[in-house]
Image (tube, rainbow, N blue to C red):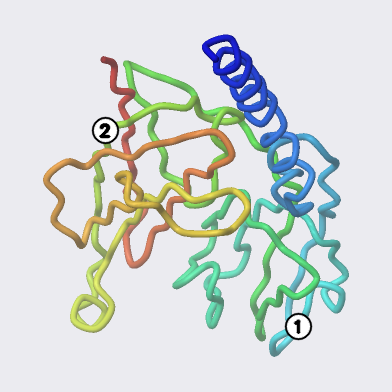
Amino acid sequence: MRKKWVIIAIIVCGFGISLWRVIPVIQEYVMPEGPKAMLGTTKNNATAKIVKNIGGVKGVDQLGLSAGIYDITILSDHLSNSPDLPDGQKGDRYLGLSLTKSSSFNVGHQEAVEFEPAAFKKLVLRDGHYMISTPGNYVVNRQIPEGQYKVDIHQIKRNNLRREKYNPATITVDSRFLNGNGSGDGNGGVISSTLQRSSPVVVLEKHRLLSISFSGVAKGSYVKLTPMTD
């Protein structure tokens, strides 16, 4: 009888080890093309192009762009009615933006935006922390290592009373699933300068994005991430 249970235990352990190895392979296989491009496991088909004066909302194909991961720069004095770049000003950038066939953009009269294939540049650790002043999506383990990070937000508000009343300045730091199935999972996932948090810590794991958004803040605002050690 004892021998029988030993055999069953060995079989169960073997199955568990096999499943542990197979699950990441399955996840990689079923993951959409965009996240695969972010991870560097497939080609990023993004194309370089300057789009200007299109007027109205246009799809990716109408803009002459391919689906892919883009770094975007505003070339005109402003950019209005754009959900991905709210309140955009000349020179503002957004990194690692995923555009699909269903994505659309509005670049109005006298407005211009430059689209480039995402560079996925590694963040540089200086004096024990990472400084990020450009909003966008940063790929964990490709641009920043896994781990827990203490978050410090340095926010410079724009001098606009109406904005402060109806749309206050905010910086949000979020740990997102790379496959798009959520925006933080409760593990210190979302940290915002408009929220009170007792422990501003973000958890970054494999197959996730470090997603940072700025709204209504002046140039010079930044996020500081300090790796936490046991």
Q: Which residue is mark 1?
A: 58
Q: Nearer the viewer, residue 19 or 209?
A: 19
Q: Which residue is mark 2?
A: 150
Instruction: Classify residue 133 by image quadrant.
Output: top left
What is the x, y in percent for residue 11? 66, 21
| Outermost residue toward the bottom in this view | 56
Task: Tell me what residue is drawn at x 24 percent, y 61 percent.
Answer: 157
The residue located at (57%, 28%) in the rendering is 141
Residue type (three-letter) at the residue carrying disc 2: Lys
SS at badge 1: strand
Q: Quadrant of the N terminus?
A: top right
Reply above or below: 181 against 83. Answer: above
Q: Are marks 1 and 2 in contact (CB under 8 Å)?
A: no
Front residue of this view, candidates 91 and 71:
71
- Residue 140 drawn above or below residue 176: above
Circle 2 — which element? strand
Rendered image: mark on residue 201:
none
